Image (tube, rainbow, N blue to C red):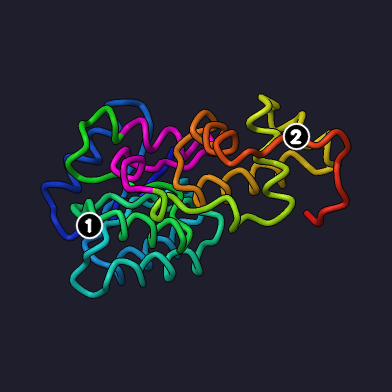
């Protein structure tokens, strides 16, 4: 895989690049020191598999950078690697479309796992969010009717393929719903999502509804 790291700290960029290559996650890692350089590289390389982005850059406040990178390449996953461990920053980053948030204090193996999870179609939420309280974790009530059904199906142990067959959705659409659910609830995997669903009393309906995709 080919990835881009955008961070103004050269030592961190080089260390993270070495980690990604040594772990086999990426075969090529490009580096940029600020938002402008990163966007230029993103424009010049349409084969990037992911962007690892710092929140605080010399020429940009990180949250706005997320929007800029997402708008330029909507299909390229963005993973935040930041010194901030403020749950509010994590929440805002995920709300803006980042598919992962890994604090720079994370052990190397955690950083690798975070990238691998995102590249496999998941959303990585750091453990600090799991202890942030219900207000930060989001609410099941904010989900659309279809997302609530998909969440109930996840809690029932159905795979994305099985969920698609049950509700007449493509597997790709189910994957999009699952990602949106993870971000809304502030969970990192299907087990945590299922726990939240059961706590909220969600149950898989006997017959699929006519909810919109």
Q: Which corner quadrant of the image does residue 197 belong to?
A: top right
Q: Which residue is mark 2?
A: 204
The residue drawn where x is 27% and y is 53% is 31
Q: Residues within 10 Å of mark 1 (few under 14, many from 20)?
A: many
The span from disc 2 to disc 1 (Cα, nearest Å) is: 44 Å
Sequence-first tag of 2 and 1? 1
Q: Which residue is mark 1?
A: 7
Indicate the secondary structure of the residue bearing disc 1. loop
Q: Residues within 10 Å of mark 2 (few under 14, many from 20)?
A: some
The residue drawn where x is 15% and y is 47% is 12
Magenta segment boundaries in residue numbering: 112-133
Give residue 48's position: percent from left, percent from top. Answer: 46, 50
Give residue 55's position: percent from left, percent from top. Answer: 27, 61
Residue at the far left in the pictured view? 11
Indicate the secondary structure of the residue bearing disc 2. loop
The residue drawn where x is 30% and y is 60% is 89
Give residue 177's position: percent from left, percent from top. Answer: 65, 48
**Residue 121 is one of the magenta-drawn residues:** yes
- Judging depth in this view, the residue of 103 and 53 nearest the camera is 103
């Amino acid at each position: 895989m080919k990835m881009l790291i955008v961070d103004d700290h050269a030592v961190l960029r080089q260390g993270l690049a070495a980690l990604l290559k040594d772990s086999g996650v990426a075969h090529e890692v490009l580096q940029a020191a600020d938002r402008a350089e990163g966007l230029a590289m993103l424009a010049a390389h349409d084969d990037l598999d992911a962007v690892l982005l710092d929140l605080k850059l010399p020429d940009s406040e990180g949250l706005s950078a997320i929007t800029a990178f997402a708008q330029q390449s909507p299909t390229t996953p963005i993973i935040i690697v930041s010194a901030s461990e403020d749950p509010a920053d994590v929440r805002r980053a995920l709300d803006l479309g980042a598919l992962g948030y890994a604090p720079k204090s994370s052990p190397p193996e955690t950083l690798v796992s975070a990238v691998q999870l995102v590249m496999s179609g998941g959303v990585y939420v750091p453990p600090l969010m799991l202890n942030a309280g219900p207000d930060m974790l989001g609410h099941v009530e904010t989900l659309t009717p279809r997302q609530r059904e998909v969440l109930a199906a996840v809690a029932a142990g159905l795979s994305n393929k099985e969920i698609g067959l049950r509700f007449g959705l493509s597997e790709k659409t189910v994957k999009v719903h699952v990602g949106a659910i993870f971000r809304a609830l502030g969970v990192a995997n299907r087990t945590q999502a299922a726990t939240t669903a059961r706590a909220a009393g969600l149950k898989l309906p006997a017959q699929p509804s006519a909810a919109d995709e």
